[in-house]
Amino acid sequence: MLATLAVLYAAVLGAQTYAPYGADIALGIALGAASIAAMSLTLILSARPRWAEPLFGGLDRMYKVHKWLGIAALALMIGHNTLEPELENVVRETRLGEFASDVGEVAFNGLIGLILISWIKRIPFTRLELPWSIWRFTHRFTGLLFAVAALHQFAVDKPSGLDGTLDLYLNALSLAGLAAWLFMQFVAPYLRPRAFVLENIDRHGSVAEVTLRPEGRALRWRPGQFAFLSAPDAGMAEAHPFTIASAPRADGHLRFGIKALGGWTRRLPERLAHGQRLRVEGPYGRFVFRKRARRQVWLAGGIGITPFLAWAEALTDTDQQEIALVWVVTTRTEAFAAERLAAIAARHAGLTVHIVASAEDGRFTAQRLTQLVPFPLHESELFYCGPTGLRDAVVSGLQAAGQRPRRVHHEAFELR
Ligand SMILES: Cc1cc2nc3c(=O)[nH]c(=O)nc-3n(C[C@H](O)[C@H](O)[C@H](O)COP(=O)(O)OP(=O)(O)OC[C@H]3O[C@@H](n4cnc5c(N)ncnc54)[C@H](O)[C@@H]3O)c2cc1C
């Protein structure tokens, strides 16, 4: 909402400032100004400012807004370039202005290419996904091209006597966007992560449970939050997001449950050795335990159990909620934390744990969920983490049966 207002404000300022030069020019400038504003905000959000997370309801949602702002910037830029506001008759041309006008074209073509690559995650009509590393590599250059676009808007020749509010607004946003990009490229990787040491690693089939102890200052997090993990000493310098799957402890130890889903997650357990140093950046996310909901269903699909492991471990005697934790796995051997959960449930009368193995018990459905949960689903709040297909099937099944929970909260294990 705030981001939309900031972009709209740029468009209105652009149209107002250039209205005396005709409708075409005013519209062209409005589109260009809105595009610069949208791109600046895209870069500001990509710096993961902690203060902004509550405004968006979590980093995953902030990245969604980032993505749609990028797409909006692309559309607005195309509009600006198509209308090509010609001010030659009303401005005194300078060499810098001409140069700025020419480089605008370069930024335009480059940004179109980069934004399209960023947007199209899967190659059309195929199941081929653009590898994350390539996607990430191309994404880095957006800031450079944005700098060129910002130079274009800053230095392009303008009529004399114009109201300066538009320039001031766009220059401030562009500077903030560029500063955010420079910070993310050159400062954040050194400033943000904290040093941890590998204390233990347990392998359970395709899942590795990694326990870390802080080397210096411990991390403070709320159960359910996630952090970016990297292990440069093991040749795994790219940071990947994982939920902290344990409750906060006085000694600052934390645990991750990492499922081998691709190259990085497959290699990590092979490369880690006791005592090795890892880097942890966070915490992020808003998928945290809500004490106020009296009846709660925690539904996990596969590795989506990790936030609920942290929630369950963090339960105290004062937590009097009725909670049904349902963990859907393919086979029971995949339920790597079953014993830990059973032990927690034995201590907390309000928590019941149900493990459903779809290969053995049949496909998991909304009906099965209503049979397992010891209270009416429509009186509860549903918390979900796992594949979107399972969530959609269960929620629409519950809806059809008149059992839609009061609220459905979910965590997406997806940031692009
Ligand atoms: C908020 C959040 C919490 C998560 N919690 C867990 C967890 O507790 N346990 C767990 O096993 N997995 C978790 N994941 C998923 C985990 O991050 C990915 O499985 C892992 O990054 C895949 O990397 P890969 O190179 O092995 O696989 P790839 O096949 O290269 O990637 C698979 C998908 O993972 C995502 N991805 C890849 N690299 C990155 C990256 N550097 N940063 C962000 N996303 C990336 C992309 O969407 C990609 O399409 C979480 C993801 C998010 C966003």
Image (spheres, helix red, strand yellow):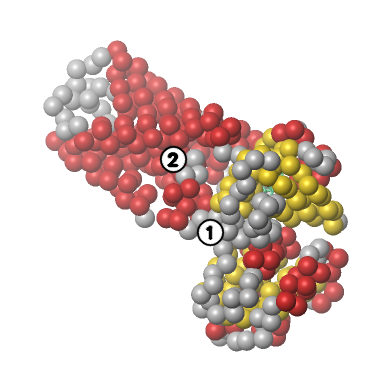
Q: Position of residue 232 (x, y in %)?
A: 71, 34
Relative horizontal placement of residue 185, taking residue 324 as reference (left or right): left
Task: In this rendered view, identify the residue nearer to me: 133 or 327.
Answer: 327
Q: Which residue is mark 1?
A: 286
Question: Is ligand 1 less than 8 Å from the beta carbon at label 1?
Answer: no
The numbered mark at residue 146 is: none
User: Residue at 82% across / 42% down in the picture?
Assistant: 274
Query: From where the camera sits, is residue 109 visible?
Result: no
User: Label 1 crowding class (10 Å Cα cut-off): few <14, some 14-19, many 20+?
Assistant: many
Give percent across and percent down for residue 303.
Answer: 73, 60
Answer yes or no: is residue 192 visible: yes
- Name the residue that disc number 2 marks: 44
Which residue is at 22% across, 25% downward? Answer: 158
User: In front: 12, or 374?
Assistant: 374
Q: Quadrant of residue 352?
A: bottom right
Q: Residue 154, percent across and down?
A: 31, 26
At x 30%, y 22%, the residue is: 155
